[in-house]
Amino acid sequence: MSTESVVRVRPWLPGDEDAICRIAARNGLSALDPSTIRNSRSLHPFAHEFRDIPAGWVLEIDGAIVGNLSNIHMLYELGGRRLLATVASAWAVDSEHRGKALRLMSTFFRQKGVDLLLNVSASPATAKILTGMKIPRLPIPDYGRPCFWATRPRAFARAALTRRGISGAAALAWPAGFALLARDVIRQSGRGRLSSAVRRIDAFDDRFDDLWNDIAAGPVRLRAVRTRAVLEWRYRAELRERRASILIAERAGRLSGYAVLTSRPDSDAAAEGGMSLCDVADLQAAGDDPATFRDLLLACIRSAREDGRDAVKFMTGTPAKRLPAERLHPISYQMPFWQQYFQAGSPELAAALAGADAWDFSLFDTF
């Protein structure tokens, strides 16, 4: 006599961490460790505001954990209003049970008590599922066209040729790299003089709280809160592993903006055709000042070049940052699928977020 399996989705519980890490490893996700999972909620500077919101869910079959979806807590502001948001991350289900994987994502989009739901790192398969669920895309067309600056043109050319499957990439990289360098010099790609003082610092300090107040008082856009405590929480792993650089712009002794430049782990180089890549993970300026954006981008490119990295990548999540980036003549391409989706908790919020200029979105918001 056959019996049906007992299938359920439940919130994370203390003690689930080891099973969640094993699921991530079995399904090829970035390595997780139990301590990081345990600390993700306790170290959050606004943990008390999310005390009733699950940190994630697991899929159980006959009592065994076979799937996971993390529910990252983020606090946003829009026009002075604070919004509770969650970001879907680390969606993984063991291969023999993937027919039931949608139960996790459905649970994420049905959760109560939050104003905004984000799934912003979708794979091609996930993008098809979210489209089928009629989850709206983030309305930022330019986010699908990343900007690149080649800090080591030959290495960049070789990686581009390798990713396209062109044979003899190593030999062709010499002439292609020279042509790319000539193009960059002629067009002044990623080159120019700074109009303000920009320097690198080792840690976030109290001035970032003042800068956040200046940013929040600027153009009305949806922004994740970026106090000093939030920035330390968001980049704690990258700073600990020395994979993050903090660059600040100053005027009259006061912060006018900052950028966080992160280098990808060496293990990610294979996915980029062997290229060592830096990401402008966050870029902020008081009043969305385009000159400050430009100076910080230039400083990021120079910093990556000095550190021996091959290229800098920047995803422009608001039109206010696209123009300063375009004036530095990047290399760009159209991504083949869309990765960013959202669901607003009310029709009023959905209407307020209907246009690209309503958003200030970046890798800061992705996990």
Image: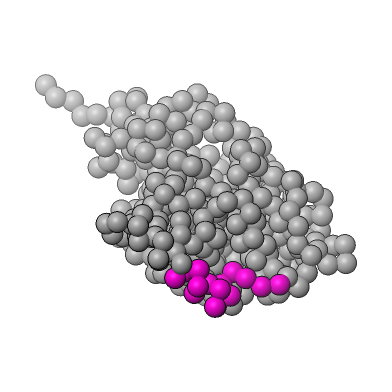
The front one of 267 and 165 is 165
Q: x, y (%) of residue 29?
A: 41, 40
185 is higher (above) or lower (below) than 148? below
Residue 250, quarter of picture? bottom right
Judge from the rendering whether residue 108 lies leftward or rightward of residue 126; answer left or right: right
The quadrant in which the N terminus is found is top left
Q: Is residue 180 magenta?
A: yes
- Report how many numbered discs are placed on residues in the image: 0
Instruction: Kindly report the secondary structure that dominates the magenta region of the rendered protein.
Output: helix
The front one of 297 and 275 is 275
Q: What stretch is highlighted in magenta?
A: 179-193
Task: Name the residue rendered at 44%, 64% in the picture.
Answer: 177
Task: Name the residue rendered at 26%, 37% in the picture.
Answer: 95
Task: Name the residue rendered at 51%, 55% in the picture.
Answer: 310
Q: Can residue 263 be spotted in the picture? A: yes
237 is higher (above) or lower (below) than 17? below
Residue found farthest to the top: 1
